[in-house]
Image (cartoon, rainbow, N blue to C red):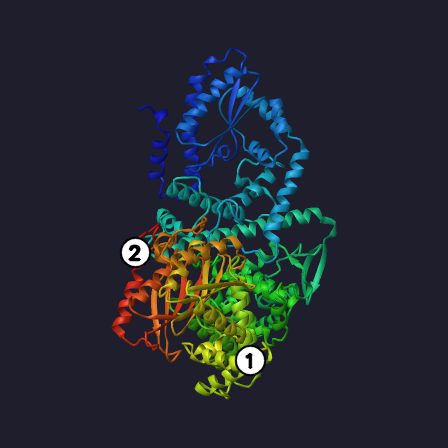
Amino acid sequence: MPLELDISYSFQRLLEKSRAVVSGRLVSRQLTFIIDSFLRTRFEKSSGILKKGEEVAVIALGGYGRMEMAPHSDVDILYLHNGVPDSKLAEIISSINTYLYDSGKEVGHTCRTIKESFRYLDDMSSFHAVLDSRFLTGSKELFKKYQEEFLAKLPPKFATRYNQAKEDQLSERFLREGRPILLSEPNLKTDLCGLRDIQYLYWTEKSRSPIRSLGGLAVLPFFQNGEVQALEEAYDFLIRVRTALHILTGRKHDRLDLNLQPEVAEYLGFGKKEDMQTIEKFMNTLYSHQKNIFFIVRIYLDSLLAAQKKGEAQNFDYEGIRFLKIGNTIFSPSEGNLFADPHTLYKDILLTFRMLQETGFEVSGGLLSEIRFASHFLDDDFRYSAEVNGEFIRILQNKKDRGRILKLMHECQVLGALLPEFGACTNFPLFSYHHEFTVDEHTLLILHELDRLDKGEFEDREISEVYGECDKTEILALAILLHDAGKVKEGDHSEYGAELAVSVGSRLGLSEEDTDLFRFLVEKHILMSELSSKRDISDKRLIRNFARTVSNPDRLKLLYILTIIDTKSVGANVLTNWKKAILNVLYKNSINFFQTNRADSEGPHGEEERIALAKDLVAYLTEKEGQDSKISKTIASFAYSVIPESFLKTVSNRKILKYFKLITSLSQDGNSDLLLDLEQDPAFVTVEVVSRNVPEILLDLCCSVSSEGLSLVGMQSYTFEEFQIHILQVTDPQGSGNISSEKLSRMEGKLRLMASGELQRDSIAFERTEWNPRKTIPESIINRSVRFSNEDVTDTTIMEVRMPDMVGLVYRILRKVFDFGLKVSHLRVSTSADYAYDSFYLQTKDGEQVKDAELLKSLEDKILRIQPVERMTGELVF
């Protein structure tokens, strides 16, 4: 087969041979050579139709012009001519383009004369593309004229306009406060510290001087030895990863998705994809390169600022240390080395950060780079220095820009030298769709929210008010730094983090009281999230036990604030209205508990408490609802008889009256066995269903909710004689609670059809009425588990299930539970982007705990065997 007929085969052979090649740009260049050779051959065969004087030059543009081809990159071509007839041009272009299309390449082409080329510069992408023009074949004389008469005479107004636009974009991306650098699923091309940022820097300088490659940036006076080399190495690695993505996905794909990271890591030679250390090593390498990009672009932006405000430069002294100040930005002094004296190094570095905190000045990338270099000399003496630790505590106690300063300290590697427990989290990936950032970036985002609280800029007024009542916020800041530090080690990260907190507290010289608070916040930082999402937070016993754990209202307030800003900083839309609402309920119930002096367990309990609640209900019904005394006592008797007994304690008096009326209506209507009511709450919709003799109504409810793409986040079930009461909390996938009336109407219609037997559950249980964008989750990332507890509630077994999230999961778990003849009285659903963590409150048919170990083991085995399915009808098959 002739060489020109098999471009795909040539690519494949090259990529197989170059799999272990270190240089990504070398592979890209070789891919470019392959396309060049095919294209030249096609042009030689088709250009015979040109007459003397008719000239065509084929020119590569954009990434193809830079010789940076990935396996599925577009091939951008300029067909430059000197007035060749359209019919001949069409024949030549068709010959080349059709061949490239048939070879699986996407082609972007333009056909112009030199004069016409000036008309197409009012688009920044087109301007950049021509900056990377490269001659391929055809008339060299015409290309030379193109260089002299077009490229050398590009109107300065375009370069000025586009350079300013690039500078503005880079400044917004790299200087914006609180913006994370490292993402768990970065787009290698367009996300921060990606290929496009480097290209913007390169294009800006290329329009000003005749540099021919990225390495040509080394002639710029503001770059130090090795910085441009580090930029080239980072660029090369990003291209390697991008090439691997194209190969493994078989298409143009620039986002490093979680489910692709094991494959890419193995392809690039980091180890076996089954080994988590392989992925960690690969992502850490990527993140290290991105950090280098961040600092080098910052230095470049500094140079632009210094050039623009050259006349504004002035010396600035702070406690004996001299800096240079330009505008609102602090630079290194123009003479001397700021951190050259080893005797004052520790103090000078900490004083620099204190100066930035107290003045509020911005810091230049060059100054950060100097501190970063000096950080290599920060040893054990640094972290054990009483003077250093004193300055650090002083920074934490100042409620001004604490988060910003700690972020700067981290970027310069000073924070890791001072707190190696946090430094171990640097670039540490979490491999979770739930977490959008690395451990350190997530932590820095929480600190940014702490700054917003300090400034009164936090969007939730009620949270701000609670924060305003908090003392010891410096300990909160420390706890934020260490709260996820335990994730670098296998096991319970909260427990390990608590151990680290004790060690850090001792080293920093904290008092015994402050160290205990520090340890508590780290150890219990997920407690409120777990209780609110997995437990019945209206249960007074739970509130009492939680209050005892927290110990006092001051600790509760700090823990509440930490929980809110921690959850918010996990990723976009993670702190949903639903999660805020249930956390707020837990906080308020606990505060009320402290305020009523019940932490010492005083007050009525058990039967005595239920009788008191029944009397309160009678009083409410007669005084507030205007009910007859006899009717009120009947309703109280009804509430007292509902199973489980928690009904009287957890359901409001208003709701008790409502359910009594619904049951009365249902008992008088011989034609209906189901009544349903919907109530809109701020963060969810409450679905209340009263049924009679519909034994599997809960399964019907789960199916109707799931089939509409809605999320079931909570459920309570109660029984009265032959009647059942189910109270469900339903929200949309974003947790906003904004569900259309049409969707709710369809859900109700399906429920009624299933309850009457006119619609089979399994026909809709695993289908949604709308597209679900959630990605497939690598099974290795999710640790499946089923755990049982008989300790929290005396008559109930709590079953916690952790599984990969899938359509109809709650429905399928409930089927297994019911197959074993068990009841479910309460359900809490916590769904992250990559897993479900659901809690089921189980009882036997007699309303007792499930203590049959063999039964529980069999139930566990059945649930763990549940697998994702695309569509299923009839009986479930495993």
Task: Locate the N terminus by quadrant.
Answer: top left
Q: Secondary structure at mark 1?
A: loop
Image height of 116 relative to 593, above or below: above
Q: Amino acid at mark 1?
A: Asp
Please tell me the numbered disc located at residue 49.
none
Q: Residue at 61% across / 73% down in the picture?
A: 466
Q: Residue at 26% across / 67% down in the picture?
A: 858
Residue 36 position within the rendered picture, expressed as x and y whole percent measured from the top left: 44, 28
Q: Residue at 60% across / 78% down in the picture?
A: 624
Residue 426 position within the rendered picture, expressed as x and y whole percent measured from the top left: 48, 60
Residue 760 position within the rendered picture, expressed as x and y whole percent measured from the top left: 35, 54
As measured in the structure, the alpha-carbon distance from the residue carrying label 2 to the one carrying label 1 is 52 Å
- Total marks in image: 2
The reply, left or right, for residue 527 in relation to residue 681 is: left
- Residue at label 2? 876
Check disc 1: other Cα within 10 Å, few if <14, some if 14-19, many if 20+.
few
Residue 559 appears anywhere in the view: no
Residue placed most toward the observer, 3 or 378: 3
Q: Earlier in the sequence, mark 2 or mark 1?
A: 1
Residue 681 position within the rendered picture, expressed as x and y whole percent measured from the top left: 55, 64
Residue placed most toward the observer, 834 or 517: 834
Residue projecting furthest to the top: 52
Task: Locate the C terminus by quadrant.
Answer: bottom left
Residue placed most toward the observer, 601 or 450: 601
Image height of 452 relative to 215, above or below: below
Image height of 512 relative to 230, above or below: below
Mark 2 or mark 1, which is nearer to you?
1
- Residue at label 1? 628
Q: Amino acid at mark 2?
A: Leu
Image height of 264 relative to 156, above or below: below
